[in-house]
Image (tube, grey):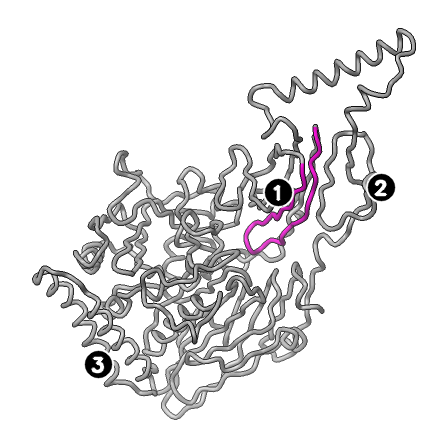
Amino acid sequence: MSVADVGRLLEVQPPATGKESTEKQLPSFDNQPFSCRRHGGFVGRSVLCVKPPCRRQLNGESCFSVDPKSKLRGLPFAGSDMLKHNLLNLAGILGCLLAWAAPGDRPVRAAGGQLQITVVDRDTRQPIACRMHLFNAAGRPQKAKRAPFWHDHFVFTDKITLRLPVGNYTFEMQRGPEYLTRGGHFRIENFADDVKQVDMKRFVDMSALGWWSGDLYVRRPVGDIELLMEADDLHVAQVVTWWNHTSDWDNRPLPENALVRFQGDRCYHLMAGGHDRAGTTLLYFNLPGPLKSGRNGGEYPPSMKYLLEARGDADLRVDLGMPFGWDLPMLVAHGQIDSVQLAHSHVCRETVIDHEAGGKARDKSRYPGSWGNAQWSQQIYFKLLECGLRIPPTAGSGSGVAPNPVGYNRVYVHLDGEFDYRQWWRNLRAGRVVVTNGPLLRPLVRGQLPGHVFRAQKDTEMEFEIGLSLSTRQPISYLELIKNGQVEHSVRIAEFANSGRLPKLQFRRSGWFLLRAVTDLPKTYRFAMTGPYYVEIGYRPRISKRAAQFFLDWVYERARRIKLTDPTQHREVLAYHRRGRDFWRDLVSRANAD
């Protein structure tokens, strides 16, 4: 097996019996090239060779070519029949040109052609929606008429007609992380008119295995949401329609039902919103209406004022949009954070946003390069776990503000039985999650999902073997077992594929562990991470003194940044941070680990 081959499927899981699993592989979906004699040789994988019609079929592929000039030049005028024949040919060409110029059906430019693409599921042969990234020879993304477009891609369902200028084009077609990518290139000539069918191969069905996907930060037009979700095979979306003091509902009535269901097992909520204040981004979910904040987005009124107001709604969930937000220690101390985004909007499909957006900046000597922001985010989260706190990780694409498709960053939540929106949120809160923007992990430890707490009496040693099913389109070199914030084992993927086993983890004291996989892509951070498992020996969680001190120092640093000239306002804001200071100071005093 070559682990660097994109488009291969790897699924290995150690069985409960201890016997070795066998490795299952799917070959690349489009390795078979086709030969185009008209244009020479093999043209490679997933290539659409598009030329104007010549009525020939080569190796099952359409290859079209005609030189319009041959109809007008080089033909002898020999007799009336030949003249009549030439005039008829000329009339046909003029008719084609007039048809191309008809209103409502014009190409992008005067010269060019068109290609109609139909997309089906390879197994069911049914039409499906997908996302397409289409670039011209200069590398500029191309739009398609009436197809929702963002940054470098558009989405459509069933079929689309691309009207394009003459030239060479490259493309990628995707449908979320559970389908193989189709990619290739084609050329458009003048008057090209071709039809191609592309089949998309699903290589894993996570929902059939009980894992349901969600994107907790979507900022796209409401009218496009259903198509966007379907095109990336997403089941839950939080659609942000208000932010700080602005709202999409200012000049229209609120919907009777903020939760919209479609296709049976897909749904989105229209009342998601956010506050971005003093370097901290908070996302609010499942509210009945907008929760507007002050216009300045600064220190006053304090974010706690709005949180306490919103907590009257039992369905409210508050997600910290980025772990490095300055108010993290204060908000956690007050019990106001339900989850933390690790696959957040700074982690993008083709790049990273290499700063902390006014939050607590990382030390770039310790967390350098394109992976630094994501690694800093994870280290902050690990320190929360080190303090004995049990806050689940989540994910949000930020599509509409970040250069991501909907569902690029996603959280999978495990459900027993059929999909249920409320149960999805209950299980997320319980930590039965995996966050990802690439690899797909399905862990099981002693028959338990992430979020489980393993308990034992004092002086008991506990040992764990992680059962794992892994599916990936991208090359992965290592799997990492994280124990108490440190990499305990780094396992080469080839070794795991051969043995079907991961090293065991031993605990003599309380702690926690999780599994992480990172792909070999240098320009962005593409990864998957399970939610944590917890171990309590002696029925007490692990509390690290060093981690608690980290947040105590953070509180002091944050308090020094408060710049309010009104003394009453200053005291009100500072009071919340003082109570946060007391919380972390108490944890330092109760620590049972370094």
The answer to which of marks 3 and 1 sits earlier in the sequence is 1
The residue lying furthest to the left in this view is 568
The answer to which of marks 2 and 3 sits earlier in the sequence is 2
Q: Which residue is mark 2?
A: 37
Relative to 215, say whether 475 is above or below.
below
Q: Mark 2 and mark 3: span between their CA atoms?
A: 77 Å
* Magenta-colored stretch includes residue 302: no
Residue at 68% from the left image edge and 63% from the top image edge = 5
**Res 136 label:** 1
Is residue 415 shown to the viewer in this render? no
Give, as a three-letter code, the residue at label 2: Arg
Say what secondary structure mark 3 lies in.
helix
The residue lying furthest to the bottom in this view is 459
Residue at 65% from the left image edge and 79% from the top image edge = 19
Q: Is residue 528 left or right of residue 68?
A: left
Q: Are marks 2 and 1 in contact (CB under 8 Å)?
A: no
**Res 571 label:** none
- Magenta span of residues: 167-190
Say what secondary structure mark 2 lies in.
loop
Q: Which residue is mark 3?
A: 586
Q: Mark 3 and mark 1: span between their CA atoms?
A: 60 Å
Q: Is residue 1 left or right of residue 260?
A: right
Residue 389 in percent (x, y) is at 32, 74
Residue at 21% from the left image edge and 48% from the top image edge = 295
Which quarter of the image is occupied by the N terminus? bottom right
Give, as a three-letter code, the residue at label 1: Asn
Is residue 274 shown to the viewer in this render? yes
Residue 386 in percent (x, y) is at 35, 78
